[in-house]
Image (tube, grey):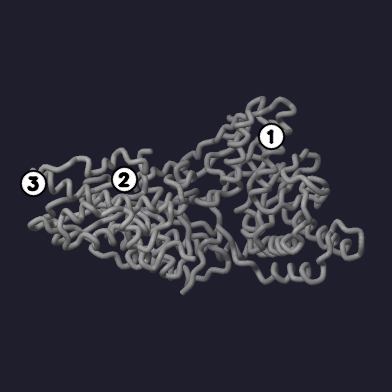
Amino acid sequence: MALYSEIVMDHFTHPRNVGVIEDADGVGQVGNAKCGDIMKIYLKIEKDIIVDVKFETFGCGSAIASSSMATEMIKGKPISEALQLTNKAVAEALDGLPAHKLHCSVLAEEAIKSALKDYYDRNGIAYDKSQFPDCDNCVHCHG
Amino acid sequence: MQVYADNAATTKISSHALQAMMPCFEKFYGNPSSLHTAGQEAKEVLEDARARVAACLGCEPREIIFTSGGSEADNQAIISAAYYGARKGKKHIISTAFEHHAVLHTLNRLEKEGFEVTLLDVKNGHNVTAEQVRDAIREDTCLVTCMYANNEIGSVLPVAQIGTVCKAAGVPFHTDAVQAAGHLHIDVKAQNIDLLSLSGHKFHGPKGVGALYVRRGFPLTNVIEGGAQERGKRAGTENLPAICGMAAALEDACAHMEENNAKVTAMRDRLIEGLSKIPHCALNGDPVNRLPGNVSFCFEGIEGEALLLLLDMKGICASSGSACTSGSLDPSHVLLAIGRVHDVAHGSLRLSLSHCNTDEEVDHILAEVPQVVQTLRDMSPVWRDLQKGEREYIL
C-alpha cells in the first residue's frame, strides 16, 4: 500500500494555485523551517468573496497536497465559509492522511485563517479573536 | 528508467548468494544441533560458512557468532562489554554522536542502568579522530564503540588508529561495521578490533542475518537465551540459508572489492561533482575518507520527503534524513551532529550506489535531481525569502 492516497499524490504532483499574489488583500504564513513545514497563503478578496488564492509551501508531500486542496476548497467562496474550513475537511477531501501527517492539514487550516485575519487587520474589520488559532503556541512546533 | 540508489538501506541479493542459499532449503535442511546425518551435514555447512566469514575479517572461525542482523550484533557487543566492565567497576563508555540507533539506543538503556556515556562530537562537521578517543578515555572506561563508516553521510572513521589508541589504553574496542563490511578492507587483528558487527543485506546477501566478531577470550553476555547454539552465546536454531547466503555474499564482495570500489567510487564522484553545481547545496560527510557508494547532500529551501517522492516518480529510489521521512519532528541525529541546522537538515538527500548501478543511471540522476530541487524551490516560501534577501542563506 502506498503511503498516500491517489488524491494526495495528484495534488502533490500537480498542485493547484501555486504562486504569489503580489497585491494580495491578506497574507498568512504558519509553521517554521525548523519543524520542516511552512505554508504561506495569499488571498484576493472582493466583496467578502475570495476571488483568488495562491500558496507557497516548504514541506513534505502531504503539506504541499494539503495546501493545494485547501486553496481549492476556499476559492470563490465567501469569507464566512472559508473560516469554517477545518483540517478534518481538508484531510477528508484528500481521502485521508497518515496519522503522523495530520498536522499538515492543521497547518493548511491555520494558514488560511492567518491570511483572513491579516485581511481583517488590514481593513480594520472587527473579529472574534477566538476564531483564530495561535500558531506560535501550537504543540506541533512548540510542544 | 528505474534506478535503485538506496544501497545503504539494503541491497539486491546477488545470484551467487542466492545459489548458496538454495541447497540449505532443499538439501541441508537438517538442524545443525541434531545428532543424525542430516543434522551433521547441516552443521558442516554452517561451520564452512563460519570459516568463510572469518577469513574475510582476518579472524578465527570460533570468533564469529551468527546473529539476526547488525542491530542484534551491536546490542550484544555493547551489552557484553558494558557488563564485563561493570564487574571490574568500570562503567564509562565512549561512542560518537553519529552512531546508528542500534548503538545509541543500547547506550541509552545502559545509561539508565547507571553507565556513563561520552559521545564524541563530530569534529570539522564530518568525522571523529583517534585523538578525541584517546582524550576521552578514563580509568573507568570499559568500552569504546565507534562505527566503521557512517550510514547516512558516508564518513569512514580512522578505525585502525582508534584501535591502536584503545589497545594502548587497554580498553575494549567495538566497531559497528555494518556499512563497511564487504566494501572496505577489514582486518580485525591488524586494526586491533575486539568486537565487530556486520549485517548480511548490506553487501548483496540476504536480510535477517548478521555476525558478531568477538576476540577470543572476550566474555559475551547473552541477549537471547535458550539452546546452546553458537557456543551457548546466542540461542536459536541457526538460520542456515541466510548464513550461507551471507558468507557467499561477503566472500564475493571481498574478492571483487577493488574492482567494485573503483567503479562505484567513479560513479559517486561524478554524482558529487554534478550535484555540487546546484546552487546553495552542501555535501555532507567526509569528502576524502568516504564510503565508495555514498552521496549525501543538503539542499537549502526544500524538504526531503517531497524530494524523495518526486524522485520516486522519476524512477529514482533514494533516502533522506528529513523529519518527515522518519515520522518524528526532528531531522536525522546524524545531520544535526555534523552541525547542519534544522532548516537545512530537512532538505537532505542520500544516494547510495553499488556495483549494480550504471553510468546511464548516474546520468539519469544528474538530469533529474536538479530539476526536482528547482520544482520544489519554485513553490517554497523559504526559497522565495532567500532569493529576495529577506532570509540569509545558510548554505
For the residues beneath circles 1 and 3, the answer to whether they share a chain is: no
Residue A32: mark in rendering: 2
- Which residue lies at the image location 74% right of the left edge and 68% below the top edge? B20
> Is B298 left, or right, of B21 in this rendering?
left
The answer to whether residue B387 of the structure is visible from this angle is no
Distance (Cα) linking label 2 and label 1: 41 Å
Amino acid on which disc 1 is placed: Ala
Amino acid on which disc 3 is placed: Asn
In the rendered image, which residue does mark 3 sit on? Answer: A123
| Helix, strand or loop for disc 1 | helix
Q: Chain of mark 3?
A: A
Q: Chain of mark 2?
A: A
Q: Chain of mark 1?
A: B
Q: Which residue is at the front of the view, B318 or A52?
A: A52
| Helix, strand or loop for disc 3 | loop
Figure quadrant of residue B88: top right
Label 3 Cα crowd, 10 Å radius (few <14 / some 14-19 / many 20+): few
Question: Percent position (x, y) of residue B342?
Answer: 39, 44
| Helix, strand or loop for disc 2 | strand
In this view, the residue farthest toward the right is B36
Label 2 Cα crowd, 10 Å radius (few <14 / some 14-19 / many 20+): some
Rendered view: A20 above or below B166: below
For the residues beneath circles 2 and 1, the answer to whether they share a chain is: no
